[in-house]
Amino acid sequence: MYENQTLQGRAEAGVLQTNKVIRNTYMLLSMTLIFSAAMAGLSMMLNVGMGAYWLSFLGGMALLFVIPRFANSTAGIGLVFAFTGLLGFGVGPIIAAYVAAFSNGAQLVMTALGGTGVIFLGLSAYALTTKKDFSFMGGFLMVGVLVAFLAGIGAAIFGLSTLSLVVSAMFVLLMSGMILYQTSAIIHGGETNYVLATITLYVTIYNLFLSLLQLLAAFAGER
């Protein structure tokens, strides 16, 4: 009987810990998305060029190697805001370019934002309510992202617009899978650090938005 009570206590403690990670992750993610949007708006107001995107991107990638070292401290939260702020500032010129290039550019941006929100909330809710284990997708997603990334570099170097669209479509599917995978990892204890979980989900949302925007511009853009 005592053993059963001990096991029950451990199970309850595990559920409480999981709920805490979920709560902290989505709270921090919400705040960083708002901050990132504000930084994007600031870069658009300042009318910065595409060079700001590349500098922000490189700075963000550098922070990705630093954040895990501080993931268990309050400094990690500050680094998360620095990372998302940099990427948000860098995405401003991209949004401005789409708005300027297409007569319905603002509509394309809002549609991409809406689509990103619907996909993220829908898949997150599915993973949270069904509690299915999507850990089996880990290897496939890693290989898929690597292949898509290399294909994207090739498309950019050789100016292959069709391949670029294929890569964007791949990223939409891969990022959708990543949402299920990461949410499942939180639920089942595979990810217990909300700072790292927030970073993963933010990068997923970031790539999902840019990929949807490129696809919408290609098929619904009006020059």
Image: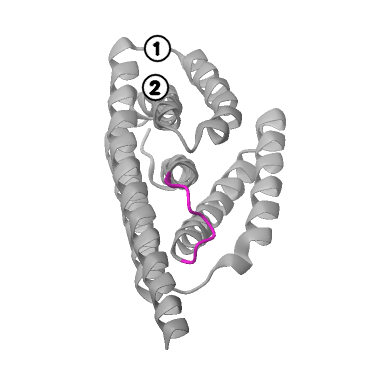
Residue numbers of the magenta segment: 188-194
Three-letter residue code for mark 2: Phe
Secondary structure, mark 1, is loop
Is residue 61 inside the magenta stretch?
Answer: no
Three-letter residue code for mark 1: Val
Secondary structure, mark 2, is helix
State the residue position of label 1: 48
2 in relation to 136, above or below: below
| Nearer to us in this view, 129 or 121 | 129
183 in relation to 96, above or below: below
**Which of the two labelled residues, at mark 1 and mark 2, occupies the earlier sequence position?**
1
Which disc, if any, is residue 195? Answer: none
The percent coordinates of residue 106 (x first, y second) are 28, 34
75 in relation to 144, above or below: above
In the picture, which quadrant includes the C terminus? Answer: top left
Image-quadrant location for residue 202: top left
Q: Residues within 10 Å of mark 2 (few under 14, many from 20)?
A: many
Query: CB under 8 Å between callouts 1 and 2?
Result: yes
Residue at 34 percent across and 35 percent down: it is: 32
State the residue position of label 2: 89
Residue at 51 percent across and 52 percent down: it is: 175
Q: Is residue 92 visible?
A: yes
